[in-house]
Amino acid sequence: MQRTVEQYLGRPYVWGAAGLKSFDCSGFIWRIMAENGLYVKRTTARKLYISLPRAPKFGYYDSGALVFFDNLKHVGIVKDEKSFYHAQVSKGTNLSTFDPYWRSKICGFRRFPTQL
């Protein structure tokens, strides 16, 4: 999955876009899931949160877990305990750190299902 994520880094943010040249946050997640054989309906971060299984507390920062922010208005993919990938309005698709700003906005974690 990491290779798929990294091939799309640096693409601009465009609301409603799901690749290949631009993304919004949930479109970025949808594209990564689809290219890794996990097919779900293209949806918002909020609906994605509701539809996916919870991540176990000990697995919140496991690589590939999904992290949700800002009252379920934003979503990213955990790289490790220190960073996550996402499509950010101001920077496009990028790797950000779990700095105090982002940590304060976390509202939940989900995991990719093993089977859909």
Image (spheres, rainbow, N blue to C red):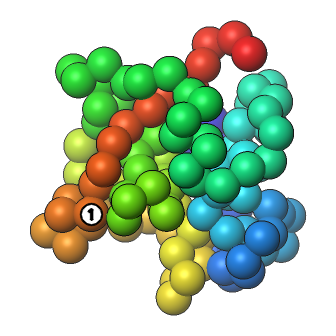
Q: Can residue 79 be seen in this view?
A: no
Which quadrant is the N terminus positioned in? Answer: top right
Which residue is farthest left? Answer: 100
For image coordinates 38% across by 24% down, the residue present is 55
What residue did someone put label 1 on? Answer: 105
Query: x%, y% of residue 31?
Result: 76, 48
Secondary-structure class at tag 1:
helix
Amino acid, disc 1: Lys
Q: Position of residue 34 (x, y in %)?
A: 80, 37
Quarter of the view holding residue 110 = top left
Q: Which of 110 and 37 is in front in this view?
A: 110
Please indicate, yes or no, whether residue 106 appears anywhere in the rendered image. yes
Which image quarter: residue 10?
A: bottom right
**Residue at image location 52% in from the left, 40% down from the top:** 49
Is residue 74 rendered to the left or right of residue 115?
left
> On screen, 32 above or below 71?
above
Q: Quadrant of the C terminus?
A: top right
Viewer-side residue, 53 vs 86: 53
- For this view, does 23 lie left or right of residue 105? right
Using the image as rendered, state which of residue 98 and residue 16 is in the foreground. 16
- Where is residue 20 shown, x and y percent of the image? 85, 64
The image position of residue 87, as x and y in percent, is 57, 68
Residue 7, picture quadrant:
bottom right
Name the residue located 46 percent from the left edge and 40 percent from the top edge.
66
Number of marks drawn: 1
- Seen from this angle, which residue lies furthest bottom? 90
User: Looking at the picture, does residue 65 appear above or below residue 42?
Assistant: above
Relative to residue 22, is residue 4 depicted above or below?
above
